[in-house]
Amino acid sequence: MGTDNIIFLEVIEWFDETGRELVHRIPEKGSGEIKFGAQLIVRESQAGVLFYKGKASDAFGPGRHTLVTANVPVLTKILALPWGMRSPLRAEVYIANMKVFPNLKWGTRDPVAFKDSELGLIRLRAHGVFNIQVVQPVLFINSLVGTMGKYTTEEIEEYLKRVIVSRFNDHLGENLDSLFNLPGRYDQLSEGLQKRLQDDYSRFGLALRHIYITSITPPPEVQKAIDDKSRLSVIQDLDRLVKMKAAMAMEKAAESPGDAGSGLGMGLGFMMPAMFAETLRPQRGAGASAAPQEINCPDCKNPIPKDAKFCPHCGHQQVVFDQCVNCGKILPQVRTPGG
């Protein structure tokens, strides 16, 4: 390669103007010739890694660094006269952005299967956001970046969100029994999912700082079933559900213009009581216990109907007690045959 293609590196630095680059390579293509005493400037929230022959030779934190023999021993060759004080070292520098990258999107491309304890097997969609940070630059460069000139969040976001969706499927199935119990569980599910993903991210030199689940959405027919349950409170009562649906359909038809709607509206008032008589009637045993229907005969002590005027066993005439409105005294009164 001729000298026209050689990039002489004397001051090495990088500004992230987009705010989306995780790593930037200097030079972006090929390799550069590093002079003895070249200055490497690493800013706050950055880390510099010097690569020679495809391997990391040294790492640098924030500050100004002078590249001399202590960094790369081969630089001592610049002292040889044939090189004319030019370094024969062909190398490149990667500068990693160590800040937290927030608001990266993740979501299910296709619905995922979920076995709901009440609704059965349904398919869900989920979406959210997550934040990442490069914590081990050399590992990140070697495992994901390779020889790319620059590596942006857009290039890694697609892969990372697939990892999230894969872990989300297992996590949701193990920690949620029904969608009816989902309200108030988003934070708990997010924290558990973050712990589950830490190992997946750390093997690439990344840290998952936060992950948020913003929505878990069932298909429209399941949402409709949830709405029906909220109206009736008990979706298992199919009889009441069917009657409610029929009433809603007739009410909607009655509101439509035309003679047919008017006729249906007139008949609705007659049909509704019959339709809901059984539905709205209190169930046996559900309310307070019914009053006793029998009493004991004061003479023979045998049980007799409460409203009986004579005991069917001994013929004793029954007596009811009235209370005086003035003094409150109990007054015996013999029932007359017409009473």
Image: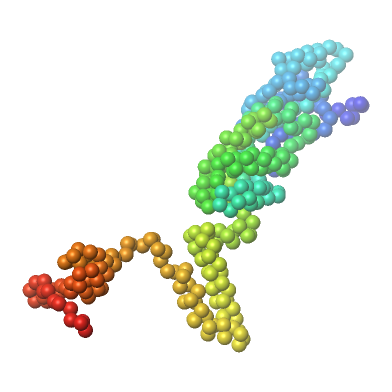
Q: Is residue 145 above or below residue 332?
A: above
- Depth check, front residue: 216 or 161: 216
Give me the residue at 74% from left, 27% from top. 142
Looking at the image, which residue sits at the far right? Answer: 2
- State the image coordinates of residue 122 (x, y, percent, origin top left): 63, 52
Tell me: 281 left or right of 171.
left
Q: Is residue 316 above or below residue 165?
A: below
- Depth check, front residue: 322 or 314: 314
- State the image coordinates of residue 90 (x, y, percent, origin top left): 82, 23
- State the image coordinates of residue 265 (x, y, percent, origin top left): 54, 83
Q: Is residue 17 above or below residue 145?
A: below
- Depth check, front residue: 158 or 153: 158
Q: Is residue 42 visible?
A: no
Looking at the image, which residue sits at the far left? Answer: 327
Tell me: 162 left or right of 83.
left
Give me the residue at 77% from left, 30% from top. 146
Q: Is residue 307 above or below residue 21?
A: below
Give me the residue at 56% from left, 49% from top. 117
- State the image coordinates of residue 129 (x, y, percent, origin top left): 62, 45
Tell me: 188 left or right of 9.
left
Looking at the image, which residue sits at the far front? Answer: 314
**Chosen colour scheme:** rainbow
Q: Quadrant of the N terminus?
A: top right
Location of residue 160 (image quadrant): top right
Q: Is residue 244 visible?
A: yes
Q: Quadrant of the C terminus?
A: bottom left
- Depth check, front residue: 174 or 290: 290
Give me the residue at 20% from left, 72% from top. 315
